Amino acid sequence: MGLQCFIDYPLKDLVPHIDWTPFFHTWELKGSYPKILNDIEKGVEAKKLFNDAQVMLEKLISEKWISAAGVVQLFPANSVNDDDVEIYTDEERHKVAATLCFNRQQQEKPPSRPNQCLADFVAPKESELQDYVGLFAVTAGIGIDEHVKRFEEVHDDYSPIMLKALADRLAEAFAEHMHEKVRKETWSYAKSEDFTNAELVKEQYAGIRPAPGYPANPDDTKKDKLWSLLDVQKRTGISITEHFAMLPTASVSGMYFSHPDSKYFAVGKIARDQVESYAERKNMSVETVER
């Protein structure tokens, strides 16, 4: 379950994993692929965009305009203190490499619906079960700036948007592809999984890959520990800004949870008591956490 690093990953292997629906949203065409291609109002424009995308996609792959890189690793882990997860340096689990702090939902719910936290999906330390958490970072945007600039220099406004949209789709496809490999091969908790891409897009598989900054995991500062544990910048070239934006922007990072009941959710609003607790656990000021 050691570290896996991928440099210049074949883009052609990512194409079958592309979810095209968000591609059309980039162009403010709301609808799901492939239905949107036959939409009475949007179909003509959607087909033109899709055809243009196929032409550029083939060209950017054959001429190697951009390249993909990624890093993935599974770490021994257990949850502690209800809302945190300890990441251990090795299978002995004596030394803590990092502690990931999470937020718990606090809205009122019926008794049958618990207030969720991502730490719920990792075996508690006191259970003595040996669980794991995966970390990953992938990009499909290496080299993109050169080609964006090339188009802009000839006042081509359409092609840079198309290229960026395709790079974003390839990065998401890379994340989906890596998650599938982890489920079936590396972690191998779903060896017999056999889904079509449409089923993968609908997240019918077991396990989740929440990203920092998203509803179940709203704190972007976790990228600091992710980048440190995986040595992301050195291994892939993906950097993070002081505000935790990823560069290249066509990048995806996050965590893997394998629990069969794990699912995406929104933390939503939390009260002052949790903000203060979170700040203490993160060794950050309350003001920083609030911001």
Image (tube, grey):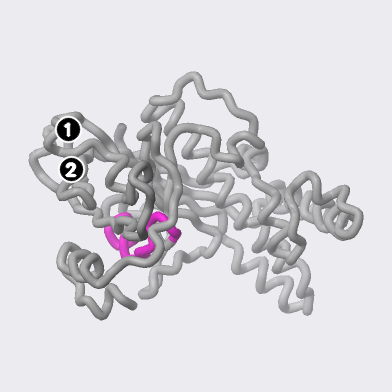
Residue at left 43%, top 36%?
Answer: 207
Image position, residue 40 (x, y; %):
91, 54
Residue 132 location (% of width, % of height): 27, 36
Disc 1 residue type? Glu
Q: Residue at x 44, y 31 (%)?
A: 183
Q: Decide whether residue 90 is among the magenta residues.
A: no
Residue 223 inside the magenta-drawn segment: yes
Mark 1 touches mark 2? (CB < 8 Å):
yes
Task: Give the distance between the C-alpha atoms of the residues marked 1 and 2, in whole angstroms.
Answer: 7 Å
Residue farthest to the front, as pictured: 110
The label on residue 88 is 2
**Residue 176 visible at all:** yes
Is residue 103 depicted above or below 205 in this figure?
below
Amino acid carrying label 2: it is: Tyr
Q: Foreground: 183 or 198? A: 198
Q: Is residue 135 visible?
A: no
Q: Which mark is residue 91?
A: 1
Tell whether 53 sits left or right of 169: right
Q: State which region is magenta.
A: 214-226
Give residue 111's mark: none
Tell me where residue 154 appears, x and y as whole percent.
78, 77
Q: Look at the numbered disc 2 and give the secondary structure of its residue.
A: strand
Q: Dot 1 surroundings within 10 Å: few (below 14), some, or many (20 or more)?
A: few
